[in-house]
Image (tube, grey):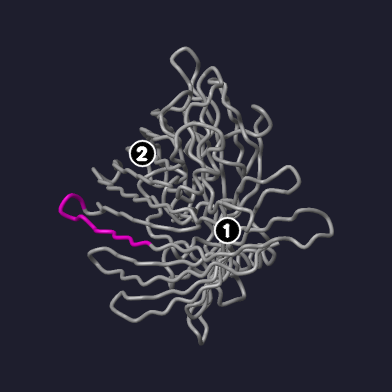
Amino acid sequence: MDWDIGFYVRSVRKTVQYVKICSLYGAGFFYIPGTDTCLKVGGFVRAEVNANAGGSFSVLSSGRLPSSIQASEETWRTRAGVSFDARTQTQFGTLRSYMILATTETNGQVGGGGAANGPGVGNNPGGSGLAPYTRLWSNAAFIQLAGFTVGKTASFFDFDTNPYSNQTNFWGSNYGGAGIDVFAYTAQFGNGWSASISVEEPASRRMSITSTGSATATPWAYGNQQVPDVVGNIRIDQAWGSAQVMAAYHQVRGVLTPGLGVTPTESSEAGWAVGGGLKLNMPMFGAKDYVIAQANYSKGVISYVGQGVNGGFALLNEDATIASVGPAFDAVVTNANGDMSLTKALSVTAGFEHFWSAQWKTSLYGAIGEVRYDDAAAAVLRGAAIGPSADWSYSQIGSRTVWTPVANLDLSVEVMYNNLNTAFGTAGLIEDKNWWSGIFRVQRNFYP
């Protein structure tokens, strides 16, 4: 019996010593037993309720706006995820693989009579009607080695990733919340300077193509993918902050198929986007304070200017009459020859965050953007209706306060004012709209 106890104690001691802390990459890593690979396991659990907003504080883009005599639209969401970060030293540098697996349950309650879209459709909450839905998702799964990044992650066009807000961004290029497939290379030049070139999956950046159509022909739409988006940036990261300039190419390929067995008609144009971002650390206000901003301009690819635009606005009044609209198409086919008018868009996002203490922080942020169509495109879009111009703009200003009562537990309250300047003028049933939205979120992060 004594021999059995001694053997057990020695076995336990040996097992505990075998799982070792890995200090090469920061807190939380440990060596996978029997290997030289370091692993970090992390994750989060989040619960939130949104008022006049979709899940993850996305902007309401369709349905009816609430009034004082009807309840506001509410969206309840619970989300949880676990992440794995594995790293190994090689002759080419650190080999890293990272992935996150998460689940989301969303329940859209529409007190104001708005419609609820299914999962992954538009910016509205809910599943079928008012029923909740649950889905699995991942916004990151990539491999990195010797400057190369392959897999699903944020776009290399992104700079302002909205750290000052819980919002699923409307304006700005930030694709980190959804992730996009990339094959990229980053070169480091020293003193904080770097440059990246990335080929990225193009369908995620498509907004849509439209035309007048006809009684015998299918309207124009995007054709199959042929060419990936090509993104490049030049960046600097130093003690004062960081800055980046970036550009992107996007194929705008429209296809019209008149009927079965007939060769499709095709039209293709080069869409593009440019942008610039700046982040300044503000230690004169607080040790962690910062201000960040990004400006973007695009032609033929709205998503680089407004990743969350998702088809634009179609808001209704309480009596279901049209209230305010904002059409969003990458291109409009303006005649039978297939000539395409590429849509122009621009946006600016900015935010400032102040850390009152280790437990409290408050941000102030804003965004503004505009979508512009030429006269030929506007004539197609308005049809027989109302005002001459299809241009529209949307702006927002908001503030978030976060309380961290204990490490890795965040309780946040955020409010945002929204203003939509409608397309087609302010005649008849069309009018500009203003509304408030808010979110309360509790999030527990379980990583060191």
**Which residue is under mark 1?**
339
**Which residue is under mark 2?**
396
Residue 441 visible here: no
Which residue shows up at 64% across the image and 54% down it? 336
Q: Is residue 12 left or right of residue 448?
A: right
Towards the viewer: 153 or 26: 153
SS under mark 2: strand
Return the residue found at the far left.
Answer: 284
Image vertical order of residue 121 relative to residue 434, above or below: below
Range drawn in magenta: 275-286
Q: Position of residue 113 (x, y in %)?
A: 57, 21
Q: Residue type at mark 2?
A: Gln
Return the residue found at the far bottom.
Answer: 91
Return the residue found at the far top.
Answer: 69
- The N terminus, quarter of image: bottom right
Residue 348 magenta: no
Q: Is residue 7 left or right of residue 22?
A: right
Quarter residue 422 falls in:
top left
Q: Is residue 162 left or right of residue 185?
A: left
Q: Are marks 1 and 2 in contact (CB under 8 Å)?
A: no
